[in-house]
Image (cartoon, rainbow, N blue to C red):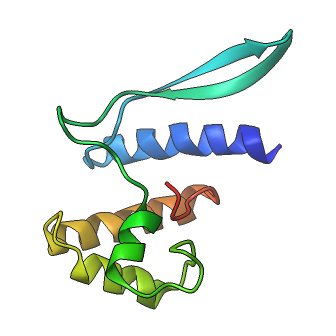
Amino acid sequence: MSYSNSCFSEYLGCQIYESIGIPVKKTLMGIYTVKGKQKIVVACGDFTEPGVSPQDFASLKNRMIDSERQGYGTELIDILQTIDEQTLVDRDSLLERFWDMFVVDAFIGNWDRHNGN
């Protein structure tokens, strides 16, 4: 059940983001058949720019702070410190996007948000 809920949360979250004017990747709900079994899936459009590779937050966090849990801890103080110390993206823009994401995830019950994303 949690697997199918995460697909709905991903799709719904992106639709909500888009409806309130926050730039977001394009998503499409569908059904994928594997060995005769159907699964609900969400396809996500490529949101990268040429020459840019996505990276998970845990990898960034590991480069910024000393992390006991290899970057996968979700302590707010560590996340905010990482946002503050990173130099890849404008700090204020990233912080605003983080809080937008936090609120939308809480609103829709997206429990799949973790530092591996």
Q: Residue furthest top?
A: 36
- How far across and how far down the image is residue 29, in percent? 57, 24
Q: Does residue 82 lie above or below 113 as drawn?
A: below
Name which quarter of the figure residue 35 lies in: top right
The N terminus lies in quadrant: top right
Residue drawn 34% across the image and 46% down it = 54
Q: Is residue 70 left or right of residue 1?
A: left
Q: Does residue 41 lie above or below 108 as drawn?
A: above
Q: Is residue 87 left or right of residue 46?
A: left
Name which quarter of the figure residue 8 lies in: top right
- How far across and how far down the image is residue 38, in percent? 80, 17
- How far across and how far down the image is residue 100, in percent? 35, 64
Front position in the image: 5 or 91: 91
Front position in the image: 37 or 21: 37
Q: Does residue 49 lie above or below 69 as drawn?
A: above
Front position in the image: 17 or 30: 30
Residue drawn 52% across the image and 37% down it = 11
Residue drawn 24% across the image and 82% down it = 84
- How far across and how far down the image is residue 115, in percent? 51, 64
